[in-house]
Structures are given as structure tokens and as C-alpha cells.
Amino acid sequence: AADALKRALECEPSNERWQAEYRSLHARETSDDTRDCSSSSSGGREEHKARGNEAFRARRSAEAAGWYTRAIEADGDASSAGEASSNGAEVAVLRSNRSAAFMKLGANSEALAEARRCVKLDASFVKGYLRLGEALGAMG
């Protein structure tokens, strides 16, 4: 998430919303709470998803994207490489959520990539198509 935000700022350095989000993310990375978040291997997919949802509701989009990434990677999930797995529907929801977080950050190409992965994992998940349409629309 931080990398996506940095790339977005390189393209549009005067965007105050992104600057504020980046400062906020950097401040959280140096706090004890965020160190626990970024280094935590404990907790499973559901815990990481819940923390991502909480961060997203609090409008901390970069943090939310990080939690969704941890949830996707939990338990060595094969679908992080884009492969369907037995828990593909769960991972599709996480990819959809991460797409929404990227959209809030203005990282539209990352949001589009996540939405495409979401639809590939679960073609019956309607919200995946919503995310795909939103990302395509944002890209023009």
C-alpha cells in the first residue's frame, strides 16, 4: 500500500489527500501498534480481514490495504499468485476490499489489477464486477 501511495504521489505530488495519507501511514509505521501490524504473523485471515475492515471504515485506506494483503497471504494462500484455490471465494472478497482501498488512495491501476484478480477467482461474486467497473471508470 505504501508503494502504491508513493507512486501516486510521484505522479501528482501536489495532491494534499495523498500527502496526508502518506504522512499518516508513515507515522503509524513508526508506532508500536503498526510495528505489531506489519510484523505480525500471528492471527489468521479473518482477524486480518477484520482489522482491514476497521481501518477502511476509519478512512485509513493505506492501512486497510496492508491488512487485506496480510489476509490474502495468510496460511500461504496460493491465490496470492492469482491461482484459484479451495478458498477462492474468501480471497475474492479480500481482493475486492483491497481494490476499494486502492481506489480511495487514487491508485487506480492497482485497484484495477485487484478487481481483475477478484473476478478471476470468483466469477459469481457480483461486487467484483462493481469494483472492476469503478476502477475502469476511474482510469477514464
Image (spheres, rainbow, N blue to C red):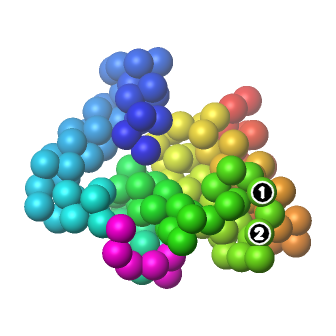
Badge 1, how many Cα within 10 Å: few under 14, some, many 20+?
Answer: few
For the residues labelled 1 and 2, the Cα–Cα distance comes to 6 Å
Q: Residue furthest front?
A: 76
Q: Is residue 80 left or right of residue 119?
A: left
Q: Residue at x 69, y 32 (%)?
A: 139
In the image, residue 43 sits, relative to residue 73, either above or below, namely below
Of the pair 133 and 116, the residue shown nearer to us: 116
| SS at badge 1 | loop
Q: Are marks 1 and 2 in contact (CB under 8 Å)?
A: yes
Badge 2, how many Cα within 10 Å: few under 14, some, many 20+?
Answer: some
Amino acid under label 1? Glu
Q: Residue at x 53, y 61 (%)?
A: 73
In the image, residue 104 sits, relative to residue 39, either above or below, namely above
- Region of the chain picked out in magenta, as a range: 41-46
Which numbered circle lies on residue 83? 1
Q: Position of residue 122 (x, y in %)?
A: 82, 67
Find disc 2 in the rendering and name its residue. 85
